[in-house]
Amino acid sequence: MRSDEKLLLLKNETTYRADAIPTGLANAVLAKDVEITPLEVTALERGLVKPFLGADEEILTGEHVLITYKVELQGSGTVGTAPALGPVLRSAGFVETITPATSVEYDLADSDYESASIYFYMGTTLHKLIGALANVKPLVEKGIPYLEFNFIGLWEEPTKVAKPTVDWSTWQKPTPTGEGRTSGFLLNGFAAEPIKLTLDVGQDVKFIETLTTAKVDITNRKASGNVSILAPELDEHNYFDDAKNSVTGPLAIQLGQTAGLICTLSCPKVQVKAPKYGDFEGTATLDMDLILIPTDAGNDEIKFTFT
């Protein structure tokens, strides 16, 4: 077994925890930095008395699986066609809306989250995550933008299998950030010059086990983030006042400029926390933590729009 021989498949489930049986030709995920905890458990120590010293055996319970990975944030190449990462976003608490020849939008779901069956191959060892749900973090800095997913899924016994044939053709090459490729950045209505933007949808994904049942669910959400921008002059925009006075405003950024490969991240109501000075290539920066707040409509702290 070679540690670099990894393969990841994901397919959304029609019925919760009913194995969707993803295949390599239709459901392969082009991922990086894949880390798996193949058996996450609670260890119960029996604590039995005995007439001699020594450790007790433990009984394991609450078996589930954790997996974390990144995917490149890129569209499908065709306007109005869902990107290859769409099923992964759907299993991270988002609802997909396709407007043919116009756009594909991903909005936060209120409930009835769409779970996924995930197959992870380490060589010829197959680990399954059933009924899996995730939190997601958009990561945008110099280079390739990513989405980082943290999944929890129900446990099934690993099996030895033949590796499937894989097709990654729906995954487009990523568009790196930079002038002429990234645009439309706004923070509290000001067109600042961003250096780094990290967002966290803040889904509280939990493995929940009762005496008779086990499931994975999203029980809470508190979205947040962090941004680093070139420090503007105070007469251009005063983020110190914004923080002191709890001012909220929109955040947006457009990744890509070619139709079919454009993704816009938008957050309608963002509060900046106390700015701190930093340095970027000898230029002063403002580094600020962010709170992503829903509007009165709810479930709109962050939105992905592919056009």
Image (tube, rainbow, N blue to C red):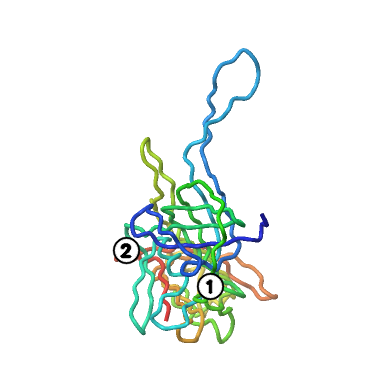
**Which mark is nearer the camera, 2 or 1?**
1
Residue type at mark 1 is: Trp
Residue, far front: 162
Q: Position of residue 163 (x, y in %)?
A: 57, 61
Left or right: 290 as drawn, with respect to 178: left
Q: Position of residue 128 (x, y in %)?
A: 49, 53
The residue that label 2 is drawn on is 298
Q: Quadrant of residue 250?
A: bottom left
Q: Position of residue 55 (x, y in %)?
A: 63, 24
Q: Is residue 82 above or below residue 273?
A: below
Q: Earlier in the sequence, mark 2 or mark 1?
A: 1
Element under label 2?
loop
Mark 2–mark 1 Cα distance, whole angstroms, equals 36 Å
- 83 or 251: which is nearer to us? 83
Residue shown at the point (52%, 76%) measured from the top left: 169
Element under label 1?
loop
The residue that label 1 is drawn on is 168
Quarter holding the N terminus is: bottom right
Q: Is residue 210 above or below residue 58?
A: below
- 188 or 145: which is nearer to us? 145
Q: Position of residue 95 (x, y in %)?
A: 35, 66
Neighbourhood count class around disc 2 (C-alpha, 10 Å): few under 14, some 14–19, many 20 upward: few
Residue shown at the point (50%, 85%) measured from the top left: 257
Quarter holding the C terminus is: bottom left
Left or right: 289 as drawn, with respect to 214: right
- 257 or 81: which is nearer to us? 81
- The disc at residue 204 is none
Residue, far left: 297
Residue type at mark 2 is: Gly
Residue, far right: 282
